[in-house]
Image: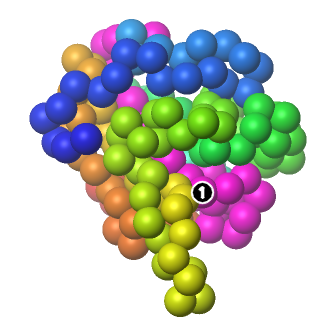
Amino acid sequence: MNIGDKAPEILGKDENGKEIRLSDFQGRKLILYFYPKDNTSGCTAEACSLRDHHQELQQAGYEVVGVSKDSAASHVKFKEKYELPFPLIADIDHTLLEAMGAWGEKSMYGKKTMGTIRTTFIINESGIIEQIFAGKQVKTKEHAEQILGK
């Protein structure tokens, strides 16, 4: 997916099994962020940045949805542990990850594997991708401020 593309209508199911659709956010901007794994340092820092600035993001017209390949049960624990106020999609089969281009080859300790590429899509009120932060562009500890342009 690229800037100017329309995001998919069906995003997936959240930690409670509720289907999340793009149209659920019509008239609001959506921060759709993809992260590798619940309860890891970078992913926790990113989620907590979005949590800590959630009210400010909402006042600026944004809603937040996180996505990883973790199970719904893992998401429930992650949300409870860090009091995350936004839904987390359990994309176990990588459907949305692959559709959005957030699944690909990664290198860790010199070994190549397939996995989630940390990516955030800023989607406008009409469902069009306006901005993309990918890989090392994502500053996990200041991600909310990065989105708000601070």
The residue most toward the bottom is 110
Give the amino acid type for the residue marked by disc 1 in the picture.
Pro
Q: Nearer the viewer, residue 45 or 52?
A: 45
Q: Is residue 51 above or below residue 126?
A: below
Residue 138 placement, left or right of 112: left
Residue 118 visible to an observer of this rendering: no
Give percent across and percent down for residue 77.
Answer: 86, 41
For the point 64% across and 44% down, which residue is it?
Answer: 69
Q: Which of the image's four quarters has the N terminus?
A: top left
Give percent across and percent down for residue 78.
Answer: 79, 45
Q: Is residue 108 magenta?
A: no
Q: Which of the image's four quarters has the C terminus?
A: bottom left
Give percent across and percent down for residue 86.
Answer: 63, 31
What's the image's color scheme? rainbow
Residue 42 placement, left or right of 1: right
Residue 11 visible to an observer of this rendering: yes
Give percent across and percent down for residue 137.
Answer: 35, 68
For the point 31% across and 13% down, which residue is it?
Answer: 27
| Picture quadrant of residue 75 | top right
Q: Please give the range of residues in magenta.
A: 24-47
| Picture quadrant of residue 54 | top right
Q: Is residue 24 above or below residue 6?
A: above
Residue 81 placement, left or right of 22: right
Residue 70 placement, left or right of 33: right
For the point 44% across and 66% down, which residue is it?
Answer: 105
Q: Is residue 134 above or below residue 130?
A: below
Q: Nearer the viewer, residue 16 or 91?
A: 91
For the point 77% across and 58% down, which residue is it?
Answer: 39
The residue carrying mark 1 is: 36
Disc 1: CA contacts within 10 A as few (<14), some (14-19) or many (>=20): some
